[in-house]
Amino acid sequence: MVKHLVSAVVVLLAVVMFGLVFHKGTNAQAFSPAGGRTPVIVELFTSEGCSSCPPADQLLAKLEADQSIQNAEVIALEEHVDYWNNLGWTDPFSSESSTLRQYVYAETLGNGNAYTPQMVVDGQDEFVGSRERQARGAIGQAANRRKADVTITAGERESDGSQVFRVTAGALSNLSPGDAPEVWMAITETGLHSDVKRGENAGEDLHHAAVVRELHKIGAADGSSETSFSTEQKVKLDRTWKRENARVVVFVQEKKSKRILGAGSALVGR
């Protein structure tokens, strides 16, 4: 009887251990895409004319360079607004499109106010962009949400300098009822800086993170398909941009809620 009791205990322990291993494995698989980190889009609305913006620019650059937040792959989008341009200094990286995008966030996220520096994590959490502890917390939470896999494959560079990128997005989960998933492509450039002559930052040499050079919608995703989106996009960089510092970023974002459902990035290369 003792022998049978020992055997039963061994079997029971084996079942428990198998259950723990299986549970741990499925949790890891649920939240970790290929590569082990979940891409998180971190947007910063900033301006060279704003004296409180440089610390936020530096924080964004640090978060993307260090990649020190567990399970998160930080994808930085530094978006320069243009409403500071009439206050002494015209930001060379500013655009009306960045301002309009921030206005949409102001309405969607409920604060109704556009300000700089403003950080937005995965289209859902917004706060003053220089608050490192809050940024790390929001990015960490975003990394634990289930995301669609987004892959970007670079083709050969053509004679005119253009390059075709193949973009594919996997199945989308937890779509908001009645919302529409849109697919966006951004071109970013790092290594940019300005010797500011006037305005609140006069006399400063300001260095930036991944500045958004271009951002546009490339299509709509199909929430009912295993491959929710697939296309080829031709990218041609402006001659003044440094190809070796350029990156293609693609993300799927709900039109109404602004939730980001998946993202990916790829270097343009030389």
Image (cartoon, rainbow, N blue to C red):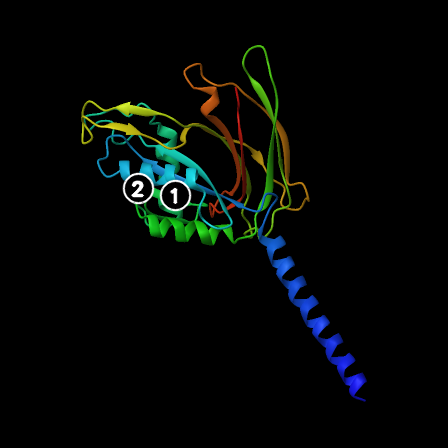
**Image position of 211 (left or right of 83):** right
Dot label at residue 114: 2
Type of the residue with mark 2:
Ala
Residue furthest front as drawn: 3
Residue at left 64%, top 41%?
Answer: 228
User: Which mark is first along the chain, 2 or 1?
Assistant: 1
Residue 130, given in percent of the width and then of the height, sits at 30, 44
**Image position of 243 (left or right of 205):** right
Residue 27, given in percent of the width and then of the height, sits at 60, 58
**Image position of 69 (left or right of 199):** right
Q: Secondary structure at mark 1?
A: helix
For disc 1, the neighbor class at 10 Å (few under 14, some 14 to 19, many from 20) is: many
Type of the residue with mark 1:
Tyr
Q: Are marks 1 and 2 in contact (CB under 8 Å)?
A: yes
Residue at left 31%, top 48%?
Answer: 131
Mark 1–mark 2 Cα distance, whole angstroms, equals 8 Å
* Most foreground residue, 212 or 10: 10
Q: Secondary structure at mark 2?
A: loop
**Image position of 256 (left or right of 1):** left
Q: Is residue 136 visible?
A: yes
Residue at left 32%, top 32%?
Answer: 81
* Most foreground residue, 194 or 218: 194
Disc 1 target residue:
105
For disc 2, the neighbor class at 10 Å (few under 14, some 14 to 19, many from 20) is: some
> Looking at the figure, which quarter contains the N terminus?
bottom right
Residue furthest top as drawn: 159
